[in-house]
Image (spheres, helix red, strand yellow):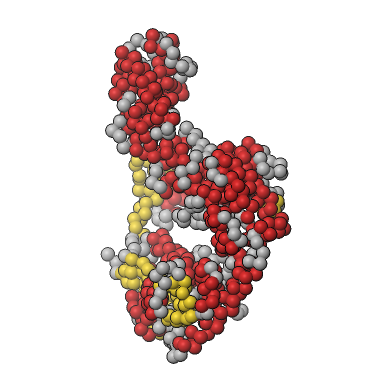
């Protein structure tokens, strides 16, 4: 086994984009690992490091060279390798030349398919130190950087100007150029606390050396954990709990190499504003962690992080307090100004904003959603007038100063302003819930009016954008239609609502006035939503063949689809499942291939069958059909499949003793009618022939 050493690559730069730092770090690690694997260089572990001013990768126990390989090349077939006089042909000589050898050194390779000339040679593996520069350069070139920049007079491009590059293999520097920088063993610490050059002696000492000599915590996850703990301790010191959201925690870790907590305060009068407004202001504009009490109520404190250990932290505290006050004052101004006009008074202004060129304005969308909400509420026996009222006001908070400043508060501010206007509580909550679920895995709307509005708003968007011909392709989905489709499905399924999807889509499509093909669009939207349903079901633990079994019978109600799916999942756990699935598959194949049409009904069939096994199956199938009728009426698909599972012995006996495709055409038709009747009983739930053994 060849000698192994640790490898360290570090690229030092100006401050990297904080929201992309982790993405760049992970990509660099993955690219280097892929490059090493492609070069057949072995190692035992890999780790990425990332700070605002550096990206680094440590590879442990990297082999010193590629393994030596035996390479066998196949040449021309023997019959083409010799001229009529027995001398080597041009093809044979050309093959020998391509292998850098003479004809007499070639061998013969015999296989079941013939005999060829061949040449076997030992290829010595390249040394790791020779391979690494290009692997590193390619790894950097392949980083997901949307816009690269140049600096100075250089033609080099990167996301930010670079200042140093470390490439250390064991205790040896691999001399090369990376982004026009000569590589070495010299890194740099914290910009203010330890700006001097620091010489690295061994790759494995990288993180410890930066910590002790450079005032830099190189490990991103370590910094995140430190920031979380420090924020909690600082909040505890003022009698509260830090409100920490993962996105902000990650961003703060990407902004600081040596994070130091600072606790600040603001005027308690601002606590009269909605807590979400203060939280958004502090998090979005200032990168502060808000502080709450044990009841979850906001306190007049915040936690920020400085990238230096100041000798006068109080000055940093006062500076942050001075900065946050005007931000909160702006929010206070927006709140007071917005409340001078009711949401209803803002309805007219919705006609000034275009939703989509073919679909008209936000006002046009609002009137469509009102009609959709009315239709859905009537179908579900929910309050129609409240549903229409919520739809009328749904987008009015877009006209407020607060939402104009903080777009992420749309809906939520609608709820606050609606309550302030004296609107019914159900309407106010619906204004916020219309946007639920906000992201994958987040809660769906649960109030009756909120559910109606959430479904109506998303169906209008889906059908409208599809009717305008703007169908999502690949990863391009500017109107977030995939999220909207999943939101519709989850809202229906998780609230146990009986809604027919194609019917709802039909209603929505009739509300548009531009020209489009109604039937084609309905099919496209329906298929698009059911494609999202498959992903949802797979995430819930159902298998692809279970989904296909249900999809084959075309249920149009998402809730009904899920109920069937659960029944199929439970059915396949029964001991009869494999046998019946195989039998159904056999039945479907027989019916598909047969030229003899099966009769539409089984009336009088008992007098036209002769074998005891087929008569027994007919009787059992008729009894089962009678038994499952009330079960199907109650949508008890589980009990239905359990009842049909009892047919297993009769089905097995039939196929063991009865020849379906007999020469007697009349008897063959009768047996096909029996099988068709049996198949139809299972298809009342799902096509279990789709289940894989």
Residue at horizontal 43 percent and vertical 86 percent from the top: 309
Residue 333 image point, x, y percent: 62, 73
Residue at the bottom extreme? 311
On the rendered image, what quadrant is the N terminus found in? Answer: bottom left
On the rendered image, what quadrant is the C terminus found in? Answer: top left
Residue 302 image point, x, y percent: 47, 77
Residue at the front extreme? 422
Q: Is residue 316 left or right of residue 240?
A: right
Q: Is residue 112 visible?
A: no
User: From what the image shows, is residue 245 above or below residue 567?
Assistant: below
Residue at horizontal 36 percent and vertical 32 percent from the top: 639
Residue at horizontal 61 percent and vertical 67 percent from the top: 402
Q: Is residue 14 left or right of residue 515?
A: left
Closest to the observer, 93 or 487: 487
Q: Is residue 291 visible?
A: yes
User: Which picture quadrant has residue 326?
Assistant: bottom right
Residue at horizontal 41 percent and vertical 68 percent from the top: 295
Closest to the observer, 123 or 575: 575
Residue 157 image point, x, y percent: 56, 72
Residue 487 image point, x, y percent: 52, 50
Q: Number of marks in the image?
A: 0
User: From what the image shows, is residue 501 above or below residue 240?
Assistant: above
Closest to the observer, 610 or 359: 359
Q: Is residue 185 left or right of residue 159?
A: left
């Amino acid at each position: 086994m060849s000698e192994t050493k640790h490898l360290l690559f570090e690229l030092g730069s100006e401050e990297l984009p904080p929201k992309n730092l982790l993405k760049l770090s992970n990509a660099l690690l993955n690219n280097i690992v892929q490059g090493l694997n492609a070069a057949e260089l072995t190692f035992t572990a890999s780790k990425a490091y990332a700070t605002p001013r550096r990206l680094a990768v440590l590879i442990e126990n990297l082999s010193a060279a590629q393994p030596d390989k035996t390479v066998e090349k196949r040449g021309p077939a023997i019959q083409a390798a010799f001229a009529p006089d027995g001398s080597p042909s041009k093809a044979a000589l050309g093959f020998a030349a391509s292998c850098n050898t003479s004809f007499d050194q070639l061998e013969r390779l015999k296989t079941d398919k013939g005999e060829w000339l061949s040449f076997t040679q030992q290829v010595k593996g390249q040394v790791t130190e020779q391979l690494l520069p290009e692997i590193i350069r390619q790894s950097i070139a392949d980083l997901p950087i949307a816009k690269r920049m140049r600096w100075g007079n250089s033609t080099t491009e990167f996301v930010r100007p670079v200042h140093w590059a470390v490439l250390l293999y064991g205790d040896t520097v691999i001399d090369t150029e990376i982004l026009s920088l000569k590589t070495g063993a010299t890194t740099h610490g914290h910009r203010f606390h330890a700006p001097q050059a620091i010489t690295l002696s061994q790759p494995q000492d990288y993180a410890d050396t930066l910590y002790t000599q450079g005032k830099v915590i190189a490990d991103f996850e370590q910094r995140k954990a430190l920031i979380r703990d420090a924020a909690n301790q600082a909040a505890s010191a003022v009698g509260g709990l830090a409100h920490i959201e993962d996105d902000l925690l990650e961003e703060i870790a990407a902004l600081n190499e040596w994070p130091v907590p600072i606790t600040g305060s603001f005027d308690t009068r601002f606590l009269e504003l909605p807590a979400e407004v203060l939280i958004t202001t502090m998090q979005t504009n200032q990168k502060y962690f808000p502080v709450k009490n044990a009841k979850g109520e906001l306190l007049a404190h915040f936690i920020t992080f400085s990238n230096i250990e100041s000798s006068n932290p109080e000055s940093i505290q006062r500076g942050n307090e001075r900065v946050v006050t005007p931000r909160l004052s702006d929010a206070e101004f927006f709140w007071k100004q917005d409340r001078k006009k009711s949401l209803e008074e803002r309805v007219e202004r919705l006609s000034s904003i275009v939703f989509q060129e073919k679909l008209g304005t936000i006002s046009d969308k609002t009137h469509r959603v009102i009609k959709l909400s009315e239709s859905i509420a009537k179908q579900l026996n929910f309050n129609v007038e409240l549903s229409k009222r919520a739809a009328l006001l749904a987008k009015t908070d877009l006209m407020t100063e607060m939402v104009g400043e903080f777009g992420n508060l749309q809906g939520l501010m609608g709820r606050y302003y609606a309550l302030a206007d004296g609107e019914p509580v159900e309407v106010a909550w619906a204004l916020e819930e219309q946007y639920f679920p906000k992201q994958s895995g987040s809660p769906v709307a649960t109030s009756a009016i909120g559910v109606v509005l959430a479904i109506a708003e998303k169906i209008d968007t889906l059908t409208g954008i599809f009717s305008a011909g703007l169908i999502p392709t690949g990863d391009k989905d500017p109107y977030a239609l995939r999220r909207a489709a999943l939101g519709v499905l989850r809202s229906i399924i998780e609230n146990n609502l009986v809604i027919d999807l194609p019917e709802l889509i039909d209603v929505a499509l009739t509300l548009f006035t531009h020209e489009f093909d109604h039937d084609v669009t309905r099919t496209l939207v329906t298929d698009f939503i059911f494609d999202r349903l498959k992903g949802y079901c797979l995430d819930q633990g159902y298998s692809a063949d279970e989904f296909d079994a249900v999809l084959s019978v075309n249920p149009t109600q998402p809730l009904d689809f899920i109920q069937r799916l659960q029944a199929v999942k439970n059915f396949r756990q029964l001991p009869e499942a494999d046998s019946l699935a195989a039998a159904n598959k056999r039945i479907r194949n027989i019916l598909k291939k047969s030229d003899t049409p099966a009769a539409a009904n089984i009336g009088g069939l008992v007098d036209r069958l002769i074998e005891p096994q087929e008569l027994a199956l007919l009787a059992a199938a008729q009894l089962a059909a009678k038994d499952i009728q009330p079960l199907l009426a109650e949508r008890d698909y589980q009990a239905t499949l359990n009842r049909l599972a009892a047919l297993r012995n009769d089905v097995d006996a039939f196929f063991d003793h009865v020849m379906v495709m007999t020469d007697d055409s009349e008897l063959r038709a009768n047996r096909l009618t029996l099988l068709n009747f049996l198949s139809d009983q299972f298809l009342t739930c799902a096509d279990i022939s789709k289940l894989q053994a």
